Amino acid sequence: MREAWHTNEETLYIIPQNLHADEIDNHKQIAEKGTFICPYCKAQLSLKSGEI
């Protein structure tokens, strides 16, 4: 899923593809703070990167 509800801005956020490693780390830190939630079930999202 690339869609997330951004709780601070109260908008639907599309997580970009092909992010650089530092941008991925930044998004992961934001997600760990509970900023991204599922727009459908409202569960907190965590950002995953890579095939594993």
Image (spheres, rainbow, N blue to C red):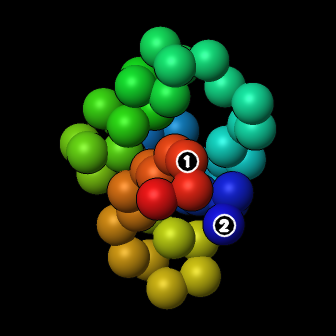
Q: Amino acid at mark 2?
A: Met
Can residue 36 be seen in this snapshot? no
Relative to 27, residue 37 above or below: below
Please state the horizontal and vertical placement of residue 26, each as a whole percent of the image: 41, 23
Please state the horizontal and vertical placement of residue 5, each as a whole percent of the image: 56, 57
Q: Nearer the viewer, residue 25 or 44?
A: 25
Q: Looking at the rendered structure, which numbered label has been put on residue 1? A: 2
Please state the horizontal and vertical placement of residue 28, each as a whole percent of the image: 38, 37
- Residue at image mark 1: 50
Q: Secondary structure at mark 1?
A: loop
Q: Secondary structure at mark 2?
A: loop
Please state the horizontal and vertical placement of residue 6, each as a whole percent of the image: 52, 48
Q: Nearer the viewer, residue 8 or 20?
A: 20
Residue at the image point whose x is 62% and y is 17% from the top: 20
Q: Nearer the viewer, residue 49 or 3?
A: 49
Of callouts 2 and 1, the N-terminal one: 2
